[in-house]
Image (cartoon, rainbow, N blue to C red):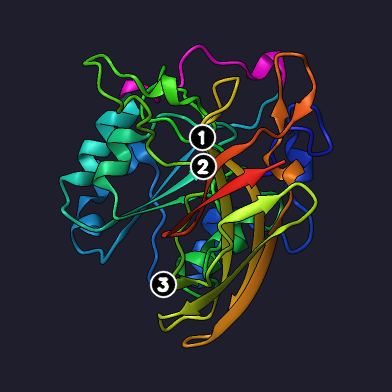
Amino acid sequence: MNGAWSRTWQGMDEKWDVEPNQKTLEAAMLEKFSACTAVLEEEIAKNASLFRNADKIVWVLAEKPSTEKPGDIDDLNYEDRMHQLAQELKAFNKPIVLVLLQNRPRIITDFDQMSDAVLLAYELGAQGGLAISEVLAGEVSPSGRLPFTYPKHANDLLTYDHKFTEKLDQQFGMNAFDPLYEFGHGLSYTRFEYSLDPVAKELLASDSLKIQYSVKNIGTTASYETSLLFVSDSVASITPPAKRLRKFAKMWLEPGETKQATFYLKAKDLAFISKDHKWVTEEGWFTLRLANQKVTFFYKP
């Protein structure tokens, strides 16, 4: 879990794995869940009764830390044996929680479809075992947002800020952007409700656009919520991205609590590099999106 460049180049030197208070994920899980049993993939068959009597299966799918050229791989898909393992676990007909310890977006589409929950833990360091076990126990509500677009297929690598034209699919529809999870995706153990105050319909170059909104925790668990403000340019002299993240904020909310926050957009937040290699903000219509809220406004230089 320490990852590459953790004291050593490839992060594989085991002499650093024995620090005080450092636990492997297995040790942390066994300590957190007294009825938990750890089983290696090659031991599933002889421990079938454990799986049949279990409440849930936590499947930890991991790759070794690596970096630079020694860490390169030729295929983002997992090996065939992992798909065979998935079918073995699925056959027990138990809820499956998939925990991913990986340093790149490996293709997990089949595994995702058979899992009831997925925790992307990356290679999160010396205290990672404790952190994961606390999240799975419900002691910590996850609040991270995906910092990249997670592909559904190995060659399906359109990023969140793709061009409108890149959405053209093989049937000449506009469905080519179809990732497993979009940039900014993330769930927690509660739910949030957004409301947006009226937003001005016009932004002048010398002014700023005030975006005031409220977030309410409508669930039963206290948690952080991350608000992401995306902006889309309807028409530009160079084909604009479908959307760009322009602002973000994070707030702690108790169950039933409502908080207000404000973003301010200026002309420079709408700018892009022109064909003359200069930053420009062109006159026209823009759309802002905040959770399920959507507003259009006109920028006038």
Q: Main secondary structure of the magenta part?
A: loop
The mark that comes first in sequence, 2 or 3, is 2
Q: Residue at x 51, y 34 (%)?
A: 160
Say whether residue 124 is visible.
Answer: yes
177 relative to 249 in the view: left or right: left
Front position in the image: 281 or 219: 281
Query: Pointer 3: what residue?
Result: 191
Q: Judge depth for marks 1 and 3 and give the one in front.
A: 1
Q: Which residues are magenta?
A: 68-80
Classify 10 Å Cα crowding around label 3: few (below 14), some (14-19), many (20 and above). Answer: some
Q: Residue at x 78, y 28 (%)?
A: 279
Numbered label attached to residue 145: none
Q: Are marks 1 and 2 in contact (CB under 8 Å)?
A: yes
Callout 1 amino acid: Tyr
Say which quadrant the C terminus sits in: top right
Q: Residue at x 41, y 41 (%)?
A: 181
Q: Are marks 2 and 3 in contact (CB under 8 Å)?
A: no
Residue 40 at what x, y percent from top left?
A: 40, 43
Say which quadrant the N terminus sits in: top right
Circle 3 — which element? Answer: loop
Query: Pointer 1: what residue?
Result: 160
Numbered label attached to residue 183: 2
Circle 1 — which element? Answer: loop
Residue 123 at what x, y percent from top left?
A: 63, 43
Residue 175 at what x, y percent from top left?
A: 30, 28
Q: For residue 131, which quarter of the picture?
A: bottom right
